[in-house]
Image (spheres, helix red, strand yellow):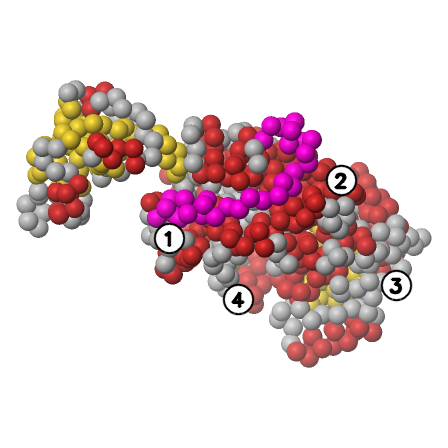
């Protein structure tokens, strides 16, 4: 049950003044935390200003600098209406003792202009000054008030992220009403820590950030922002700790076979394990041998050999008579895992099966019957398959590939498919330590840091799109020597049609200029078409593959040696690094060409520089965190990514550690949240949308 004290904050935004059904829809799109319902008052309050406008600057007309927001005390002069049917703007002159200014308006109502700027009268006007031909002007001033109404104008005005169709004034009015609804809430913070930091209470922090007195009030390091960020982090860490505790109460099974099957897998490998692979396998074996459920994150850069570690872990569990499952985010990847594991499984005596969405009903039924009878030891498929009706005779270990597309709830659903199911999660997105805590605070971590023997670093260059013809010629020469080439075009969701045209266009141009067949893969193709194009590229029927970022994760063509990434400035660092990992998988030298459209912005330039300087995914992830903040590191905001609205990994990393320790202590001393502080913490969990964890409490 949600504590009744929170009811005003969970009212829909449509209950606020000025927000009818149409505006409520826009606001929900902007601030809502759950797409299927209207945003709440709390959702609106957690939409914080990103900057502020200071209207205290009153330099006089002549001393107003270009681009400054100023407040002027002026006398209104002549109105100059444009000729009929002209597209020229409406102009109003005004002056003070230092000089003259023109106010400029497009498409404004005449009666409103005459009432708001009456000729010959004094007005207090505020807005942005622009100097044009050495004369100052102000386009659409923000305020024009009589001198005796001037105090109605806010001197410091918060600026919020907006969406098309939503006016800033509408949002500010709603925000003011929302702040009036904030109830007095019980204090959930540790008293000693609150005293030490000197932070305000939750409601005061929220009010100050929405009605700041100084620019410093909304900086990440201000006591108000720190307090709110800590509250959000504590809610997240407490929820993760509760999920962890719940997983542990479900009890695990100690699995400690003699390891013959695992050894058989390792012996069947055509190469030696790297040091970090051996360490990761040892850590996993130790987890499996304990009567506690394993929840481990296996982080490894592109091509560091995670699949081998996963198969070794699965062999260990299968040897005890249990079954294993490997879940991949896409069908291409699932097929690839199946293909790379099949020869090793055969040698180790593991019965392997593939289940995909394309299987016929008859095949699905057959596979399901074999799983129920225990005739399949290991099944590989996509996430979607396991969230459905698939059942097992005795599921022991689930390996989840690409964790960031996969949230805590799915993990819970999975574990219910068997008794004491262990979970190993793999990600090729190297995640900085602070983010591991944020997203996977409930997991132990193993890292694969070294590349398999024989892998060569990929030489990376950045080239302007002006030199496109030269690059195409060089690609043609490389193909003539027998090399294989990926050519990647970006896909930006807002304009998918345009981008699709761009990919198909690039495909046509390459075929025409190089005079040979080029394979094409993009998101709008069905699975059969994608598979056919991929197999043509793999087998060498086509030496060039033009693709959107569908090839980002896990596509394995060891003899591909060149990747060209078009419009590299549109990609994030982690994504560029993932894409570059498609080459350099064999023993031949490989290269990555980053084609960019100049001029480059500062961040894009920094990204391309880092890519040229290093092949180290962990270093790249740390730099990425500095450049663009934590919310995006794990790709666009996906189900498993905690969509933090206030806390920022790069600014509040130290608070994350404190919140995690606090969450641990809370669950040790008050596991059912029964104390007075426990009741307050229940409010906190509901407030930040982490209430699913409350349902895990034994007290309900």
Count the marks. Answer: 4
Q: Which mark is residue 665?
A: 2
Q: Main secondary structure of the magenta part?
A: helix
Mark in the foreground, 4 or 1: 1
Residue 558 point in image, percent of width and height: 65, 49
Residue that label 3 marks? 321
Structural crowding at the residue carrying mark 2, measured as other residues with C-alpha within 10 Å and reported as few (<14), some (14–19) or many (≥20): few
Quarter containing the N terminus = bottom right
Identify the residue position indicated by label 1 in the image: 17
Secondary element at image label 4: loop
Q: Around disc 3, counting alpha carbons within 10 Å, would you say few (fewer than 14), some (14 to 19), or many (20 or more)?
A: some
Marks 4/3: CA–CA distance: 38 Å
Q: Is residue 97 left or right of residue 172?
A: left
The image quadrant of residue 597 is: top left
Q: Residue at x 70, y 45 (%)?
A: 676
Q: Which residue is mark 4?
A: 526
| Precedes in sequence: disc 1 or disc 2 | 1
Q: Residue at x 8, y 42 (%)?
A: 81
Q: Residue at x 18, y 44 (%)?
A: 106
**Circle nearer the N terminus (3, 2):** 3
What range of the chain is rendered magenta? 170-199
Q: Earlier in the sequence, mark 1 or mark 3?
A: 1
Judging from the image, what secondary structure is the residue with disc 3 in?
loop
* Residue at the limit of the structure toward the right, as seen here: 258
């Amino acid at each position: 049950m949600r504590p009744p004290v929170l009811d005003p904050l969970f009212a829909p935004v449509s209950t606020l003044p000025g927000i009818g059904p149409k505006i409520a829809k826009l606001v929900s799109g902007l601030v809502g935390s759950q797409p299927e319902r209207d945003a709440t008052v709390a959702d609106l309050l957690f939409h914080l200003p990103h900057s502020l406008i200071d209207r205290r600057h009153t330099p006089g007309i002549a001393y107003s600098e270009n681009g400054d927001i100023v407040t002027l005390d002026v006398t209104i002069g002549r109105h100059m209406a444009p000729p009929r049917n002209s597209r020229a703007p409406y102009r109003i002159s005004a002056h003070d003792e230092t000089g003259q200014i023109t106010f400029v308006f497009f498409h404004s109502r005449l009666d409103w202009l005459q009432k708001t700027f009456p000729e010959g009268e004094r007005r207090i006007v505020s807005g942005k000054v622009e100097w044009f031909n050495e004369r100052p002007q102000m386009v659409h001033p923000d305020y024009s008030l009589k001198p005796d109404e001037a105090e109605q104008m806010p001197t410091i005005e918060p600026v919020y992220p907006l969406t098309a169709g939503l006016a800033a004034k509408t949002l500010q009015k709603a925000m003011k009403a929302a702040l009036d609804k904030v109830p007095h809430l019980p204090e959930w913070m540790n008293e000693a820590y609150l005293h030490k930091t000197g932070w305000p209470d939750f409601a005061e922090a929220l009010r100050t950030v929405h009605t700041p007195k100084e620019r410093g009030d909304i900086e990440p390091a201000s006591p108000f922002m720190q307090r709110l960020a800590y509250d959000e982090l504590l809610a997240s860490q407490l929820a993760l700790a509760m999920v962890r505790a719940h997983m542990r109460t479900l009890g695990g099974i100690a699995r400690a076979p003699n390891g013959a099957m695992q050894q058989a897998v390792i012996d069947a490998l055509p190469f030696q394990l790297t040091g970090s692979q051996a360490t990761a396998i040892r850590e996993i074996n130790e987890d499996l041998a304990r009567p506690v459920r394993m929840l481990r994150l296996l982080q490894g850069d592109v091509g560091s050999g995670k699949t081998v570690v996963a198969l070794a872990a699965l062999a260990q569990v299968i040897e005890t008579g249990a079954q294993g499952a490997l879940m991949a985010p896409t069908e291409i990847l699932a097929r690839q895992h199946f293909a790379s594991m099949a020869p090793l499984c055969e040698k180790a005596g593991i019965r392997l099966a593939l289940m995909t969405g394309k299987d016929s009903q008859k095949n699905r039924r057959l596979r399901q019957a074999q799983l129920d009878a225990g005739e399949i030891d290991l099944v590989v498929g996509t996430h979607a398959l396991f969230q459905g009706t698939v059942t097992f005779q005795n599921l022991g270990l689930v390996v989840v590939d690409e964790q960031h597309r996969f949230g805590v709830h799915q993990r819970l659903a999975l574990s219910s498919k068997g008794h004491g199911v262990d979970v190993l999660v793999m990600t090729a997105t190297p995640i900085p330590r602070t983010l591991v805590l944020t997203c996977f605070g409930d997991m132990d971590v193993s890292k694969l840091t070294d590349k398999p023997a024989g892998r060569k670093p990929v030489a990376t260059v950045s080239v302007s799109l002006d030199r496109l013809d030269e690059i195409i010629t060089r690609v043609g020469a490389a193909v003539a020597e027998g090399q294989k080439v990926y050519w990647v075009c970006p896909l930006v969701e807002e304009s998918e049609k345009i981008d699709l045209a761009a990919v198909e266009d690039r495909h046509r141009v390459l075929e025409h200029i190089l005079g040979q067949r080029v394979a094409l893969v993009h998101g709008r193709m069905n699975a059969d078409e994608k598979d056919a194009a991929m197999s043509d590229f793999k087998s060498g029927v086509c030496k060039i593959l033009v693709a959107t970022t569908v090839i980002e994760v896990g596509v394995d063509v060891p003899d591909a040696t060149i990747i060209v990434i078009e419009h590299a400035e549109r990609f994030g660092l982690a994504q560029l690094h993932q894409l570059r990992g498609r080459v350099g998988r064999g023993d031949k030298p490989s290269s990555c060409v980053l084609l960019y459209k100049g001029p480059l912005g500062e961040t894009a330039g920094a990204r391309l520089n880092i890519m040229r300087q290093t092949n180290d995914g962990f270093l790249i992830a740390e730099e990425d965190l500095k450049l663009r903040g934590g919310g995006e590191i794990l790709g666009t905001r996906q189900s498993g990514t905690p969509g933090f609205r206030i806390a920022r990994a790069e600014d509040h990393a130290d608070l994350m550690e404190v919140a995690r320790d606090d969450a641990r202590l809370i669950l040790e001393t008050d596991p059912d949240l029964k104390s007075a502080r426990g009741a307050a913490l229940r409010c906190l969990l509901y407030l930040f949308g982490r209430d699913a964890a409350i349902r895990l409490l034994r007290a309900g």
